[in-house]
């Protein structure tokens, strides 16, 4: 079998809207985000499990509208007055007083607030009754686990970042067998890139099968 030489250069990943792969699993979030600045109360919450593209989509929005990106550990409420603001991973812990004020500020002209989280705001713990009522009323857009369109798109992106051109039959083969998540797609591409046999091997369905079968064998050994 012919050997394939791949350059070691990597293309940097970028959180741009053009590089965001759209599909049925994230269509609701994209539509809701594009409704800015007409969000009810000025606030939108992007909700979804880890690795579905919340940060990518949120950062692309922040760049396009020149939003202030706040530190969850110490959100600067003063920086949110009269402008667009992004605050991520809110359900991982944020000062409730600061969050209350940010939501209030977002309702004023010229201001808006985009929040990201893994869980819906109605489940976020708080002892502030006024904050609880506001959380329950927020507009929520959910990003679901990636469908085939999104998974195939991110696989192509990750291969492109590593300057790899896999055989065409690699994509349908992986989609039927791989972990169905964006982090899973990134990991399988990394392993395919770094698996070497003296020289760099072509990324083929045969190589993909070897990687996936090794995962199954390792799982069996661990469970045994």
Image: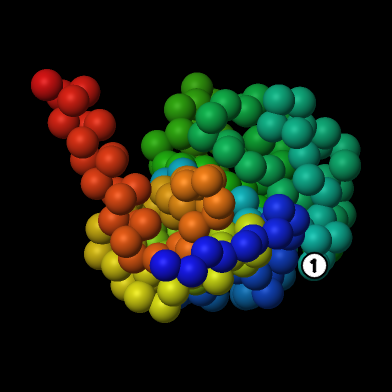
Q: Quadrant of the C terminus?
A: top left
Indicate whether 221 appears above or below 153.
Answer: above
Q: Position of residue 88 (x, y in %)?
A: 63, 42
Residue in the foreground of this view, choosing between 6 and 222:
6
How many numbered markers are drawn?
A: 1
Identify the colour scheme used: rainbow
Q: Position of residue 78 (x, y in %)?
A: 87, 38
Residue in the foreground of this view, choosing between 78 and 72:
72
| SS for callout 1 | helix
Residue in the foreground of this view, choosing between 111 and 35:
35
Q: Position of residue 125 (x, y in %)?
A: 45, 27
Quadrant in the picture for residue 173? bottom left
Quadrant in the picture for residue 36? bottom right
Badge 1: few (under 14), some or many (20 or more) residues near its Cα, within 10 Å? few
Quadrant in the picture for residue 205? bottom left
Q: Residue at x 42, y 42 (%)?
A: 119
Q: Residue at x 62, y 75 (%)?
A: 35
Q: Quadrant of the N terminus?
A: bottom left
Q: Is residue 217 left or right of residue 140?
A: left
Viewer can see residue 103: yes
Determine which residue is flagged by label 1.
Answer: 64
């Amino acid at each position: 079998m012919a050997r394939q030489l791949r350059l070691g250069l990597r293309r940097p990943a970028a959180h741009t809207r053009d590089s965001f792969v759209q599909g049925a699993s994230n269509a609701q979030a994209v539509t809701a985000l594009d409704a800015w600045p007409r969000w009810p109360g000025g606030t939108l919450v992007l909700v979804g499990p880890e690795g579905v593209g919340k940060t990518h989509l949120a950062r692309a929005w922040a760049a396009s509208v020149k939003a202030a990106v706040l530190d969850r550990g110490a959100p600067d409420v003063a920086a949110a007055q009269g402008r667009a603001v992004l605050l991520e991973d809110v359900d991982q812990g944020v000062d409730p007083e600061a969050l209350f004020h940010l939501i209030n500020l977002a309702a004023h002209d010229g201001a808006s607030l985009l929040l990201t989280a893994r869980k819906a705001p109605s489940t976020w713990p708080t002892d502030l009754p006024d904050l609880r009522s506001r959380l329950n009323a927020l507009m929520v857009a959910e990003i679901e686990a990636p469908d085939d369109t999104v998974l195939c798109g991110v696989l192509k992106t990750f291969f492109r970042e590593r300057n790899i051109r896999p055989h065409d039959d690699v994509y349908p083969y992986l989609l039927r067998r791989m972990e169905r998540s964006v982090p899973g797609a990134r990991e399988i591409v990394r392993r395919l890139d770094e698996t070497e046999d003296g020289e760099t091997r072509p990324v083929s369905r045969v190589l993909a099968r070897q990687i996936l079968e090794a995962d199954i064998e390792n799982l069996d050994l661990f469970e045994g």
